[in-house]
Image: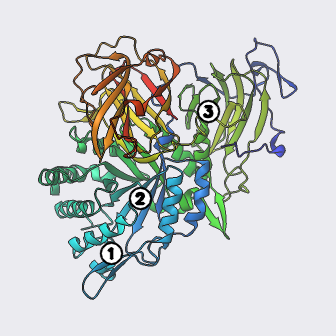
Amino acid sequence: MDNPHRPNPAEHSRRVVLTSALGAGAAALVGGCSIEHLSATSAAGTAIDVDFGTAEYFPLLKSKIGVGRALSSPDILDSLQHLDRIRPALYDAEIRFPDTGYPSLTPYPFAVGADGEISVQRNEFLDELFTGLRDRNIEIMVQLEGGPQQFWDYSADDRPHLFPKPDDLARSAEAIGKWAELYAEYPISWCTWNEPSHTLTGSPDRLAVKQMTDIYSAYTNAIAPQGLFGMASFITPSTTARPALGGRTHLQASIDALRERRREQPALPFDYLTLNNYGEELGGLFDGARNALGTDFDHVPLIQAQSGVFLPHDWEKRAGSTLEAVRSMKSLQHALRVPDLQTFTFSGWIPHLITYQRGRALQLPLFHALELYARMPERRGAVRGLPAGMGAMAASDPHRSAVLLWNESEQPQTVDLRLADLRNSGDAEVRVHHVDAEHGSPLEDGDGAFEPTEVTVLDRAAGPVAKTVTVAGPGIAYVEVGAAAPHPVLDRTGLDAELVRKHTHADRTASPNGTVSVRGNAYGCYDAVRAIAYVGVDGDDGTALVGAEYRGLPDELPVEVEADGPVTRPGSAQAMFGIRVDYLQQGRAVRSVLWHGDTCAAGRTNALPWGSGGPTADVLVETRELDRIRDGRAPLVLPLASRAPSGWAAAGAHAILSFWMDSTGPGSQARFVLG
């Protein structure tokens, strides 16, 4: 995808201070003009050092980003084209069954005949929405709120009892199951919605816990096996211990009830846990959710299904403000460091990222902030020297280096950036963007135009670059050094195959006091939009693992692997670094093949939790390319068809691709680019 931004000539009067890889006191030819060395010309500003030389742990993953909210506006269909500027991993679509006037429920999809037979009909709005998301390889999450009106008297209910338990849960589930089957061709993740103040009894008590478990079981059993299943929009107060729940938190009591239900119904799926947050502290919510899940739900990741940076009433009033974008980047930075958080969803796609006026889409500051984040490489660099009130993220690869700065205070901040150890090669441009009341904020003082405030050609990008930037208060500034051409990794498309689902694993462990954490901060994420897998381990021990299940895979699959830091001879008896393919026929794993290098402990016992083959695989293939990528990259080709069981390709070429890094040494990380 080409860079959509073009220089704004009116902004070129801004002073540009750049330094390429030259000695002190020298001048660089930049854009045909001699630009003096920073130390001789810079205005007074806080010095900030950005070091791209060593990869920091927790990359800037694009697979963490989600957007969405209630399907209440017909403008949502027009807005799909704007997703291409952000390319999120997930779209969270709320279906509120009481809101019969929403385009997602017009005409109303449920009817009951005189004989009591339930009938359902498709919705053109949903078909167009789901098709647009699937074509972009964006995961579809549908949050189910309430039940069909035929089985529940909406008129008798009001807040806080907005979504109580249906009067006839069995019939409501039957209707939901028939309706969901209409969309079986789409890979949908289904989720029940359970914010305590809006649903069921209106209070996080034992009755609400039982009702939620009943609803989840009924709806999930009616829809399964089509898709993935999650519950249930827990919020920060859900982490508070309550006497009415025997000293347990609402989260713990709900997961306890689900555990018990799964003992009765072992086939009841539970694929992810969803959280909502508006303006409250995030860390306690993540910790509380992890403590509730314990160590027996290691296949269940955390999903932030809704996130807003203000309390609910303020959130609605401050939609489209620069401060919203600034605080959202601060929240995102926190979320990126949570190893078992798969997706962090920014709520209010319309009207917080985009709003419509007189039929015209206006892109708002949070949209532009995520648009800039989407341009950043994943390999995180270190930022040092930030003044109070400011935050930053930095990343670099051989094609692009970038720094995203934000200022939460009301006063502008001038900073002197020194970008060291840029990995770029060849000629480059330096581009600067601002997001503030005057840039990219049509609801504040600006006109909504969003183009670079500076564009300068830099002759050499291999050495340090210095740049002075003033960040408005509040505001965001973005500095990018790189080629003007599309980025070969960030702008790539997904696999030409049908994504069935992702498989996740969180290596959770409990301390003696019961607090649950992720061993070695191990993470595993899959970006289906770009067909890239990421794994990492930040301790001596820890299992980093993620799987992507596809149908229609090619006979041969090229994979480019890039790694930072796997040790040559890990000391752990569980050490593993490789790619495993589990071949599926009729939904069952029939053979597994593991491509590995010299990091494959012979006596390891940690099994891959899906497929077949246990701690290694049915067939082991030594792959020397995986040994050559330490602190580098190497291409390899997986001969899928030649290793497959007979009839695999004819049966749909269905397999799980798993990317595995176990106990490979502190700070080890790897990226697998498919296709």
Quarter of the figure that contains the N terminus: top right
Amino acid on which disc 3 is placed: Val
Q: Distance between the Cα atoms at labels 1 and 3?
A: 48 Å
- Which tag is nearer the camera, tag 2 or tag 1? 2
Location of residue 234 (image quadrant): bottom left
Q: Distance between the Cα atoms at labels 2 and 3?
A: 41 Å
Residue closest to the eye, 521 or 157: 521
Q: Residue at x 55, y 64 (%)?
A: 76
Q: Residue at x 47, y 20 (%)?
A: 564
Amino acid on which disc 2 is placed: Glu
Position of 177 relative to 441 (above/below): below
Location of residue 645 (image quadrant): top left
Q: Residue 273 placed where, x, y %?
A: 31, 49
- Judging by the rendered image, the residue that carries numbered circle 3 is 403
- Judging by the rendered image, the residue that carries numbered circle 1 is 148
- Which tag is nearer the camera, tag 1 or tag 3? 1
Q: Which residue is drawn at 48% across and 45% down?
A: 497
